[in-house]
Amino acid sequence: MIERYTLPEMGLVWSDAHKYEVWCQVERLVLAAHAAAGVVPADYVEPVRRAPAPTAERVAEIEAITQHDVIAFLTAWADNTEPRDAAKYVHFGMTSSDLLDTALGVQLAEATDLLLAKADRLVAVLREHALAHRNTLRIGRTHGIHAEPNVWGHRVADFAFAMARSRDRLRRARDVVAVCAISGPVGTYSNIDPSVERYVAAELGLRQADVSTQVVMRDGISEWVSTLAIMATVAEAIALEVRHGQRTEVREMWEPFGKGQKGSSAMPHKKNPILSERICGLARIVRAQVTPVLEGIPLWHERDISHSSVERVALPDAAIGTDYLLHLTHRLITGLEVDVTRMRENLESTSGLIYTGAVLLDLVDRQGLSREDAYALTQAAAMETWQTGRAFRDTLVDRAKAAGITIDPVRLDETCRPERYVERLDGMFTRLEALS
C-alpha cells in the first residue's frame, strides 16, 4: 500500500525490518529448542541470540545474487553473528516455508490486534451516535424514494451491529491464521522433532498447524482476507449513507470540514464528501485482494510458490487498507454534523405521501374495504398529490367522500403522526445499549 494510506503502526508490522526481526525470533526459538533437546550444541545459542537482524538493504544485495530471500536472509544474518561459525545450526532441519509461514502467523496476529482495537473503537462511536439520535426523526428511503418515517439512530444502529459482527468475525479469523508450522520438507518432520514446533508455537503465542505439507493450506488466510473485505465494505456502507445525506438536494448531514479545508479548486462554495468517497474507493482495494488470495489454496502437490508473490502484495494491502478505512470511518462519525431540522423538513416535503401505507391498512381494518379497493383509493389520491402538490390528506378525504366513504379526521391524524412509526424500536435500542 502506498505511504499516503499507511498508518505508522500497521506499516511497521509489514515493514521488511520488522519481518526480519520476526524471522530472527523464529530461528532463535528453533535453535533453542534443538539445543534443549541435545540435537545441537548449546554453546551456539547465545551468539545467535546476540546477533542483530540483518538490514533490509543487505538482504536485498545478497538476494540479487541468490534469487532466494530466505537464503539471503540467513547469509546476511550469519555475517552479523560472532563468531560466524555459531550460525551453522541456524535453520537446522527447517525448510523455507517453516520460517515464512510461522513468521507470517505472527505478523497476521499483530495486524489483527491493531484492527480489532480500531474496530472496537468504531463500534463504540457508532453505538453512541445511534443512541444520541434515537429520537431524531427522518424519512426512510427505499430505492432512493421517500418511504415511511424512521429515526436516524435506527439507521446508524444497523451500521453499529454490522461492524460489531465484522469485528467478531475478525476475532475468530485471528485464531485461524495465528499458526506455527515447523515440520521440515514436505511437512513430515523428517529432520525436525514435532516438539520443536510445539515449543515455538507456545513461545510465539500461536497454535500448531493441524497439518502442513511444507506450507499451511491457504484457506485460513483466505478467510482472514475475506473477513477484512466484509469489514471494509461495512465501512463503505456507512460512507455511502453520508454521501447521499450530504447531497445538496438532501442536506441532512455533513462530513467534518476543517478550518482552511478546500472543497474544489474551481468552485469555492463546495464542501465535498471526500472522506466518504475515499472510504468507498479504498474498500474496493481491500475486496480486490480476496480472489488472488483464494487462488493460493490450490497448489501443486505438497507446495509451489504461486501464492507467495500474491501474498507479498495482497496481505499487507488488505491489512493496511482496512486499518486506514477504520481510522477514516471513526473520524467520519465523530465529526459528523447531523441537521435535525432539515431531516424533519425532508420528512414533510411530500405533502403526506409517506403515510399511504398506514392509510391503506386503516382503510382495510377500520373501513372494511378489500385490499384491492383500499389500494386503488389510496393510490389515486397519492398520484393526485404527486401531480398537484396538494396535501395527500385532502386528496384522500375528497376521493373517499366521492366513493361514499367517510374518513375519521381524528383517526387520520393518528395515522399520519410520524412518531407512531418508530414507537416499537425500543427493543432494538435496548439491544444496542448492550452492544460492546
Image (cartoon, helix red, strand yellow):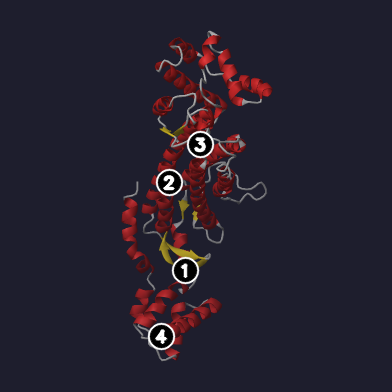
Q: State if disc 4 and disc 1 touch (CB < 8 Å).
A: no
Secondary structure found at label 4: loop
Note whether 358 is above or below 238 in the view shown.
Answer: below
Secondary structure found at label 3: loop
Label 3 vs label 1: CA separation?
A: 51 Å
Residue at image position (58%, 24%) is 70
Label 1 vs label 4: CA separation?
A: 23 Å
Q: Residue beneath label 2, please?
A: 169
Q: State if disc 1 and disc 3 touch (CB < 8 Å).
A: no
10 Å crowding of disc 4: few (<14), some (14-19), many (20+)? few
Q: Nearer the viewer, mark 3 or mark 4?
A: 3
Q: Amino acid at mark 3?
A: Val
Note whether 46 is above or below 378 in the view shown.
Answer: above
Secondary structure found at label 1: strand
- Between 360 and 40, the one lying in front of the other is 40
Q: Nearer the viewer, mark 3 or mark 1?
A: 3
Would you say 412 lies left or right of 86 here? Answer: left
Label 1 vs label 2: CA separation?
A: 33 Å
Q: Amino acid at mark 2?
A: Arg
Q: Residue beneath label 4, please?
A: 370
Image position, residue 272 (x, y; %): 58, 50
**Lower position in the chain sequence, tag 3 or tag 4:** 3
10 Å crowding of disc 2: few (<14), some (14-19), many (20+)? some
10 Å crowding of disc 3: few (<14), some (14-19), many (20+)? many
Q: Residue beneath label 1, please?
A: 147
Q: Residue beneath label 3, please?
A: 216
Q: Amino acid at mark 4?
A: Ser
Total labels drawn: 4
Image position, residue 414 (x, y; %): 34, 74
